[in-house]
Amino acid sequence: SFDDEEYRNQNKNVKITVLKNKTSIKASNLVKYYKNSTKLSVKLLDNNKKPLKSKTVKIRIAGKTYSKTTNSKGIATFAINQKVGTYSVKISFNGDKTYQSSSKTIKVYVKSAKLTTKTKKIHRKSYFVATLKDKNGKAIKKTKVKFKLNGKTYTRTTNNKGIAKLKITVKIGTYKIKTSFKSTKIYGATVFTNKIKVLR
């Protein structure tokens, strides 16, 4: 029996290892426009590919770290407010008593709409032309573009080809013309300045 002397004086330490469940992060490279509302969506999954809710997920972008808690579907969303450029984003879950840590690195591409002008020399009463297109070269139509010339600001709307025109009525000479497009829910703001020479 266990009352025997050989059992009463026996002590032994037993090490029990609790195996944590593996996790994985689901996220894809993101292309967005500057200042628009597109967000980075991150999903945290267990080893059975089931979503993990109420877990803290972090992203590190441009030297800063941001934290969000996953919802009932295991998803955490992050606003991306960086300027135009390409960014490496590290997504991480630090793990807890039940789940192992995991991480993933993706790319975020922040783009602006492409606003172009070609005119350097222009005759009075002809038109200064600006073309607005998205990243795929598709025309952005019915969108307001502003021109600032000789201290005055003019607003024009792009046509079906993404073209906005300003009739030049200033005197002969050389001018700077500022062309701008404000950010919308879809496209980011674009501003640039050209030097034009107005001819007779």
Image (cartoon, grey):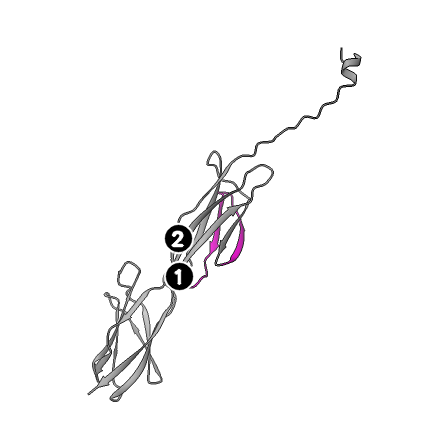
The residue indicated by pointer 2 is 30
Residue at 22 percent of width and 80 percent of height: 121
Residue 129, visible in the rendered structure? yes
Say which quadrant the C terminus sits in. bottom left
Horizontal and vertical percent position of residue 75: 48, 46
**Dot placed on the residue nearer the N-terminal end, 1 or 2:** 2
Q: Is residue 83 left or right of residue 162?
A: right
* Quarter of the rendering containing residue 80: bottom left
* Quarter of the rendering containing residue 85: bottom left
Element class at badge 2: strand
Residue at 39 percent of width and 53 percent of height: 30
Q: Is residue 141 magenta?
A: no
Residue at 43 percent of width and 54 percent of height: 88
Amino acid residing under circle 1? Gly
Horizontal and vertical percent position of residue 91: 48, 49
Amino acid residing under circle 2? Leu
Say which quadrant the N terminus sits in. top right
The residue indicated by pointer 1 is 85
Q: Which residues are magenta?
A: 63-85
Q: Nearer the viewer, residue 152 or 107?
A: 107
Vertical order, 196 against 64 (above or below): below
Considering every residue shown, the one lying at the far top of the view is: 1
